[in-house]
Image (spheres, grey):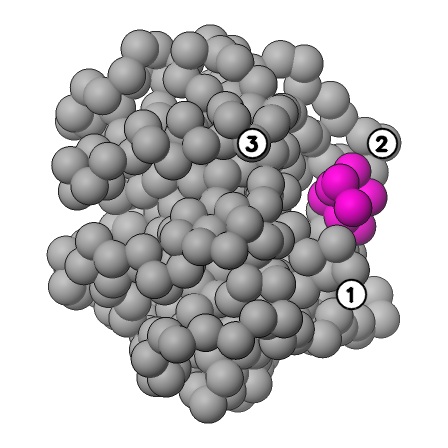
Amino acid sequence: MAGMALALVVTAPAVAQAKPTKADRNGNTTTVARTSDGRAITNEAIAKEVTAFWTPERMASAVDLDLAKPAGATEAPSGVSKPGGPAGSVAPMQPSVASDDVGTQLNESAVVGKVYFTTPGGGGASCSASAVGSAKRRLVMTAGHCVHQGAGGQWYSNWQFVPRYRDGARPFGTFVAYTLTARTAWINSSSFDEDMAIAIMHNGGNWGLKVVDTVGGHGLRWNWGYNISLMTALGYPSNLGGGESQYYCQSGTWHAGGQQIRMWCNMTYGSSGGPWLQEYNDANGLGYINSVVSHGDNPGNGQFDGPYFDDDIKSLYDFAEGISPA
């Protein structure tokens, strides 16, 4: 996770700080996505360079981000829960193109995938993420620590999403980030209460389309309470399958302290950023994102935490959708 020391394989020059970075009054921060040599990824040609950069060898050597809580990360006092607003939802979206991909299974959704990026030190790293439905159909949701190092750190570069990655295969191709967004509380303070991020993607994949047109998008829910009877988490944990295929866990959730929720799950490193889903449908691989994998105090001990999705995630979602190209 952001802030920890990683033994990363050097694959590219150190990234230049992605500027300009802009913040809004509602606690959201954005930056243009960049290559590791600091160029803005503003057109298809540069996006294709990023896809070409991530060779099978570089993807295989990418290090899964740590799931342990690093020193300096913050959260609200354990006895404080965030006041709730009215519950809201965004509906899941089906893809607009047919695919000859194999049928979905409980632990494998086409909407979920691996993300790869270059760290400021020049090494490759990876997390999990998922597409989320929106009118512009370009959004991919993950954890804040999967786009930015947190307090005192920098944005990651060469950011790409590979939906339903499996053992080196890219059945839908890859999508490269156009813009990265995160909550300002993560950027400035490494706040686990707001360890959430959304990437806005270029057209890409096997058909040159938008990501949600290609694979579909999960729905989104906020202000649904800390205690959910059944949540399904999906991701690419290194302790199960070496991070080469999707795994899942299911559990109820409860208040973990601060503005976070907790569930039982034995997935560890690499599952960071993967979605926690209400009403997951294994017939179509879609559900409602209600948190993302953030951290565990003792990864692998059977539980981990995610940010409670309240008005903050709705603000970030609206912010990302508002600055997304049509």
Q: Please state the horizontal and vertical placement of residue 176, each as a whole percent of the image.
A: 49, 39
Residue situated in front as seen by the camera: 298 or 65:
65
Name the residue tied to disc 3.
44
Q: Is residue 325 magenta?
A: yes
Which residue: 63% across, 71% down?
A: 96
Q: Please state the horizontal and vertical placement of residue 248, each as a whole percent of the image.
A: 32, 74
Name the residue tied to disc 2.
25
- Nearer to us of marks 1 and 3 is 3
Q: Read off the magenta span.
A: 318-326
Query: Badge 1, how many Cα within 10 Å: few under 14, some, many 20+?
Result: few
> Which label's residue is closer to the chain start, 1 or 3?
3
Q: Please state the horizontal and vertical placement of residue 80, each as a whole percent of the image.
A: 65, 55
Can residue 310 be seen from the camera position used here?
Answer: no
Left or right, residue 212 beside residue 129: right
Which residue: 40% across, 17% down?
A: 36
Residue situated in front as seen by the camera: 272 or 93:
93
